[in-house]
Image (tube, grey):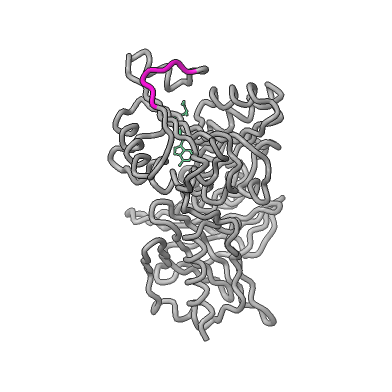
């Protein structure tokens, strides 16, 4: 994570513009004078830097990227830090060299989650494509079908974007997102196939697995009739756990294979093969006659993340809020409050228990109006996130 460390970090008077960067305000953490957030704007993007005084004997200070508002490419954040680093009298250490702002992750084929808003075409999906061998193969084999890859690992995304360019593919799109969250906002009945090959088994933290009961329900909703969800794994436990989840549904057509030759061998698969491990395939087909997809397409639910009229007294009354609200299928955690004159920033974590979203809510009281927004863009509109937002709205707008 980009940062620099100094005996004492001095932030210039804000707001100020240096080069292409606009440093907007520094908000101090309520009840903790050792931490603050600095809002930075670059083009139409915004993110926070976090300043922390360390608990070491010298009380050194660190200024770093706030991971929950991180934007890509990282070079943008590094440059903002470098600008502030260069204004310090003394710096102990930093990791801000070797970067080009326009590096990597710039491609027409890298899409935001809005890609699926009002999407109506049939498509093929791969979750956690890693080296991308299988996904590239899919795109080449199906030149007239849109292929979409979802990944959370930035180097894998950079690598496939280069490959898309080199191989001149025009039907392959990449989304940097947790697939479990994204699946919920995808449209119904459009995916020809969903591939999940060699997912991380997470034996000690199975709640982090991609394949779960909710995932399967969502996948079946997203698949078109007779569409296939294909799990391929070297992990027998993951395979059998997934099979048992599928067997709990009333009626499903499934194919199971052991050590079946694949049309393309991924890096992971090649490694397991060298180790003579068994490979398991579970193919699940969406049944056309029986509706085993009780899950609804959350795109149809009205999901606005705005606030009508936040009252300042509710923020000044911050310490009296319940900090954690736990409901059956959603939660809201109001982690902390930051303040800069007439600006309040709430650090929040909310949504589904297994796929929480971390967001900062900026609230600004101006003479004639109140402005508020989620820094870095609205949350992903899952049902759980919408419910948490509505609850927060009630707290902040309470007369
Ligand atoms: C073990 S690798 C397998 C990669 C590739 N499918 C293959 O067969 O070589 C698992 C991949 O899934 C990605 N991944 C893990 N959890 C994910 C999630 N929730 N959403 C999207 N991708 C995920 C990881 O970043 C990693 O690249």
Q: Position of residue 79 (x, y in %)?
A: 62, 45
Left or right for 369, reference 318: right
Compared to residue 180, the image places residue 136 above or below, namely above
Compared to residue 85, the image places residue 243 above or below, namely above
> From this viewpoint, which residue is outermost toward the front?
289
The residue drawn where x is 54% and y is 26% is: 132
The stretch of residues the image draws in magenta is 256-262
Regarding residue 99, the answer to whether it shows in the image is: no
| Residue lying farthest to the bottom in this orientation | 399
- Residue at the image position 60 percent from the left and 79 percent from the top: 309
Q: How many marks?
A: 0
Q: Where is residue 360 in the image (x, y as percent from the top left)?
A: 52, 62
Report the front residue among 135 and 227.
Answer: 227
Which residue is nearer to you in this view: 67 or 297?
297
Q: Where is residue 202 in the image (x, y as percent from the top left)?
A: 33, 38
Residue 349 located within the stretch drawn in magenta: no
Query: Could you tell me if residue 9 is visible in this image?
Result: yes
290 left or right, relative to 114 = left
Q: Decide: is 268 above or below 22.
A: above
Residue 148 lies left or right of residue 183; in this view the side is: right
Task: Choose between 160 and 259: the one closer to the eye.
Answer: 259
Q: Which quarter of the picture shows residue 75?
A: top right
Which residue is depicted at the point 54% across and 41% down? 223
């Amino acid at each position: 994570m980009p940062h620099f460390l100094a005996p004492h970090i001095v932030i210039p008077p804000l707001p100020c513009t240096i080069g292409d960067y606009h440093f907007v305000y520094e908000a101090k953490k309520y009840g903790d004078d050792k931490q603050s957030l600095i809002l930075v704007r670059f083009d139409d993007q915004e993110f926070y830097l976090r300043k922390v005084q360390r608990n070491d004997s010298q009380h050194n200070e660190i200024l770093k990227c706030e991971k929950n508002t991180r934007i890509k490419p990282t070079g943008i954040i590094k440059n903002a830090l470098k600008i502030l680093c260069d204004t310090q009298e003394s710096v102990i250490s930093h990791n801000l060299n070797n970067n080009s702002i326009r590096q990597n992750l710039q491609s027409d084929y890298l899409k935001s989650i809005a890609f699926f808003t009002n999407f109506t075409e049939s498509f093929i999906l791969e979750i956690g494509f890693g080296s991308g061998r299988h996904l590239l193969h899919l795109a080449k084999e199906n030149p007239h079908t849109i292929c979409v890859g979802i990944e959370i690992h930035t180097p894998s995304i950079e690598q496939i974007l280069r490959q898309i360019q080199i191989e001149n593919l025009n039907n392959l799109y990449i989304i940097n997102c947790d697939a479990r969250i994204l699946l919920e906002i995808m449209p119904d009945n459009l995916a020809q196939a969903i591939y999940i090959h060699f997912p991380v088994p997470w034996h000690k933290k199975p709640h982090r697995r991609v394949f779960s009961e909710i995932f399967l329900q969502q996948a079946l909703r997203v698949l078109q009739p007779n569409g296939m969800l294909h799990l391929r794994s070297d992990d027998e436990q993951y395979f059998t756990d997934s099979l048992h989840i599928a067997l709990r549904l009333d009626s499903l057509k499934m194919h199971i294979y052991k050590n079946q030759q694949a049309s393309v061998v991924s890096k992971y698969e090649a490694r397991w093969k060298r180790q003579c491990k068994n490979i398991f395939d579970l193919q699940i087909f969406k049944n056309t006659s029986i509706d085993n997809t009780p899950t609804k397409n959350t795109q149809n639910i009205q999901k606005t993340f705005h606030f009508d009229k936040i009252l300042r007294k509710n923020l000044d009354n911050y310490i009296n809020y319940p900090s954690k609200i736990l409901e059956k299928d959603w939660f809201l955690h109001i982690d902390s409050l930051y303040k800069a004159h007439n600006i309040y920033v709430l650090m929040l974590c909310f949504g589904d228990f297994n796929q929480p979203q971390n967001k900062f809510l900026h609230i600004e009281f101006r003479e004639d109006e109140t402005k508020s927004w989620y820094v870095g863009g609205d949350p992903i509109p899952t049902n759980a996130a919408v419910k948490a937002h509505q609850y927060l709205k009630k707290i902040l707008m309470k007369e």
